[in-house]
Amino acid sequence: MRITRSIVPNMLTLANLFCGFSSIIYFSNQQFTRGAVFILLAAIFDMLDGMMARLIKSASEFGVELDSLCDAVSFGVAPSFLLYTVYFRQFGDSGILLASLPALAGVSRLARFNVQLQSLEDKKYFKGMPIPAGALMILSYVIFYHLKPGLMADEIKSWMIVAVTIITSLIMISKIKHDNLPRPSWTAFKQRPLFFIAFFIALIAAIVSKGDAIFPIMIIYSVTSSIRHFIEWLRLRRLPEDDFTDSEVLDIQDEAFEE
């Protein structure tokens, strides 16, 4: 086995997978909070492996594929298993199908991303909600809202968990542009100051609220992305069709919704 400098980010990626596997074990034992912590740790390792790969200039196609495989478990299978264990188990085969939707959508989104990947450089936007964000959406609702006794009526909880499951899955496989996490650098801050400020406000709100604000923040993240996508769609529809050929219109659309 040949050891190269890429072993450092790859080990971080495998730590992501270990955390995802550990979360499934804890969920199966009804230890939902501990399992949720391991998914959050997986997200941290997922962020660190990319940062380390860029820092030591060891980004590679192998790393991209390994990252996707690990993400599929930590942010696809694990959240789906949480949904099944917490609520959908009671519906038998139908429950298995519904609970599997985030995993199916997340893996499909990862496959689309890898096929369309044109460079290993970091991107400002992703087409569709990134699978870690989808996992965080589901996790934050289940842990901080669904499992809290007395917060909502059981009937409302039933509708909410189904809605969160289906909507999150659809957003992940959509073509709606979602912002990538901001990289901590002065250059990046100067390019997108408002997004940086919004991100840090959201981070502080999540910490101060002890997690309760995460689910509303994720809703805002997705809604604002959808509004921006709709505005861009309207702008493209207003382009004078006579001034462009069909191929030129497609080129403009591809540029507007480029990842």
Image (tube, rainbow, N blue to C red):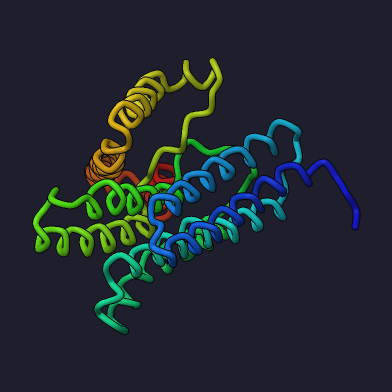
Q: Residue furthest right?
A: 2
Q: Residue at x 35, y 68 (%)?
A: 85
| Res 251 visible | no
| Front in this rendered view, residue 210 or 205 | 210
- Res 122 → quadrant: top right
Tally the numbered discs.
Answer: 0
Quarter where residue 225 is shown: top left
Q: Position of residue 254 (x, y in %)?
A: 43, 49
Q: Quadrant of the N terminus?
A: bottom right
* Residue 125 seen anywhere in this rendered image of the structure: yes
Residue 116 vs residue 49: left or right?
Answer: left
Q: Nearer the viewer, residue 12 or 87?
A: 87
State the residue at coordinates (22%, 44%).
Answer: 234
Please tell me which residue is depicted at 25% across the width and 77% down the height of the picture. 90
Query: In the image, is residue 17 above or below residue 230?
Result: below
**Image x and y of residue 86, in percent:** 30, 65
Q: Say if 216 sits above or below 200 in the image.
A: below
Residue 232 percent coordinates (x, y): 28, 41
Residue under the point 30% across and 73% down: 98
Q: Position of residue 76 (x, y in %)?
A: 46, 61
Answer with left or right where residue 95 lies relative to residue 67. Answer: left
**Residue sitting nearer the eye, 162 or 29:** 29
Q: Nearer the viewer, residue 154 or 15?
A: 154
